[in-house]
Amino acid sequence: MASPLHVSCSRTYPVPADRAYELTVAWPLEELFHRRYGPIPPIVGTDQDGEWGTFGQVRTIHLADGGSMQERLTTVEPPHRFGYEITGVTGPMKPLAARIEGTWAFEEVGTGCRITWTWVIHPASSASGLVLPVFGRIWKGYARRALDHLEALLLGALDR
């Protein structure tokens, strides 16, 4: 089996880390990831019980292309990080990833914070491992756009 691919993207925000964590962990995915980026479809909904943010919590993520995946919170360390594992990928992305480990980390920087979003993508097969580096470059663009959009969401929430 091919080795997993590690990818990450970071951005700084004029928002305290504790507040950024609190807002980000519970933000509706269909608002944060509402646009397609190349082959990565937007999220159109989630099935979950209650507000997201409890260790062990599981939800189903639905994508615009008809695919879905299960997400389980594996780490919850407010206000520093939360981590999750994605499994049960269906739809067009199924041949690519067997599972994905994700982490959002929040670090105080001056009067704001740096948020780093990381994925460790475990390939579904040796063949998919060959195309993961290409997907990793696409994911970095997807992540950069999501982190840019997150700034508008965070600042809008602080203005309320």
Image: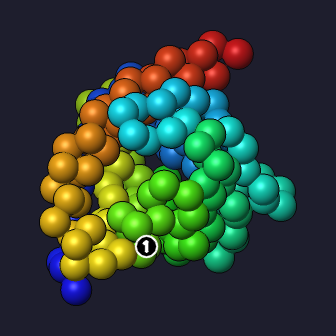
Q: Can residue 19 be seen in the rendering of this structure?
A: no
Indicate the position of residue 1 as horizontal and vertical percent values. 22, 86
The colour scheme used here is rainbow
Split into 4 quadrants, where in the image is the C terminus?
Answer: top right
Label 1 Cα crowd, 10 Å radius (few <14 / some 14-19 / many 20+): many
Q: Where on the picture, by quarter, is residue 28?
A: top right
Indicate the position of residue 90 as horizontal and vertical percent values. 57, 64
Q: Is residue 130 or residue 59 the one in the foreground? A: 130
Q: Is residue 143 or residue 110 the one in the foreground? A: 143
Q: How many marks?
A: 1
The answer to whether 145 is drawn above or below residue 159 in the figure is below
Q: Is residue 133 or residue 56 the one in the foreground? A: 133
Q: Residue at x 37, y 27 (%)?
A: 145
As drawn, is 56 to the left or to the right of 85? right
The answer to whether 146 is drawn above or below residue 1 in the figure is above
Q: Where on the picture, by quarter, is residue 128?
A: bottom left
Outermost residue toward the bottom? 1
Q: Residue at x 47, y 65 (%)?
A: 94
The answer to whether 79 is drawn above or below residue 4 in the figure is above
As drawn, is 160 to the left or to the right of 134? right
Q: Amino acid at mark 1?
A: Arg
Query: What residue does disc 1 label?
Result: 99
Q: Residue at x 36, y 75 (%)?
A: 124
Identify the element where label 1 is drawn. Answer: strand
